[in-house]
Amino acid sequence: MQQFLIIALAHFLALLSPGPDFFLVARTSINGGWRLASGACLGIALANGAFIAMAFTGLSVLREGSLLFTTLQLAGAGYLLYIGVLFLRHAGQSSLGAIAGNQALQGWWRSLGMGLVSGILNPKNALFYASLASMVASASTGWKAAYALWMFSIVLLWDLLVAVAIGNQRVLRRFARSLPWLERASGVMLVVLAAALLLHLARG
């Protein structure tokens, strides 16, 4: 139980640091509300679940320095640049209104896809779960399954909480004038993260 608490705390503290997934959930929630952003939340959780499964079953293909991991980092940098520029281009165009019918359903699936891609192309996820896997290497299959289920659930619940908090219509209307600047700041942060990742790869 002590090991579970240590791992659970380490995992939660890692979630508190804003990254590409956080900015995607925030932007989607600002643009379409928390229900639309819930698709991105599920996509991110599924991507984390895939990394957890790979790390806990002993797959080493995503360890730092491997060809696949370097390719993942390059693709991740490209995706960060893409969504960063997207945020900058569309800053201030959030409707703050509800989306209805088929448009809402299509938007939800698109949001899920973007969340899945964001989570998969975030190399921090692969490294983090690989490091956690070393801590549970001697645990039984049952405990590993419990860790995996806990982590998946916490990622999903945390992102949903972020989406609900940011996507609250009353809050959005109150800070409507600041939203374009917040979106631009998110876009700049994503572009900076992409540049830092590319610089890291170039130096390596």
Image (tube, grey):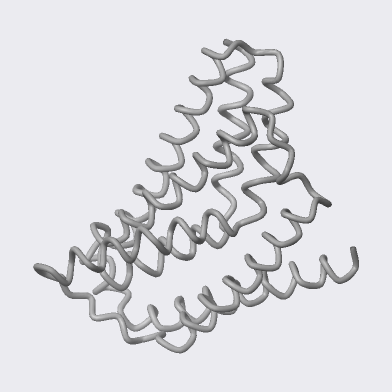
Q: In this orientation, which residue lies closer to the viewer: 88 or 40?
A: 40
Give the quarter of the figure containing the N terminus: top right
Outermost residue to the bottom: 89
Q: Vertically, is 51 above or below 104?
A: above
Count how many numbered circles sit on residues in the image.
0
Outermost residue to the left: 101
Horizontal side of 181 relative to 94 (left or right) equals right
Give the quarter of the figure containing the C terminus: bottom right
Q: Quadrant of residue 11?
A: top right
Which residue corresponds to the image point at 45% horizontal and 56% vertical from the top-left?
Answer: 116
Horizontal side of 146 relative to 112 (left or right) equals right
Which residue corresponds to the image point at 81% horizontal and 72% vertical from the top-left?
Answer: 199
Image position, residue 3 (x, y; %): 64, 16
Image position, residue 21 (x, y; %): 50, 58
Q: Vertically, is 186 above or below 15?
A: below
Image position, residue 183 (x, y; %): 45, 77
Horizontal side of 33 relative to 201 (left or right) equals left
Which residue corresponds to the image point at 37% horizontal and 41% vertical from the top-left?
Answer: 157
Q: In this orientation, which residue lies closer to the viewer: 146 or 98?
A: 146
Q: Quadrant of residue 82?
A: bottom right
Image position, residue 104 (x, y; %): 18, 67
Q: In this orientation, which residue lies closer to the viewer: 177 or 42?
A: 42
Which residue corresponds to the image point at 32% horizontal and 64% vertical from the top-left?
Answer: 29
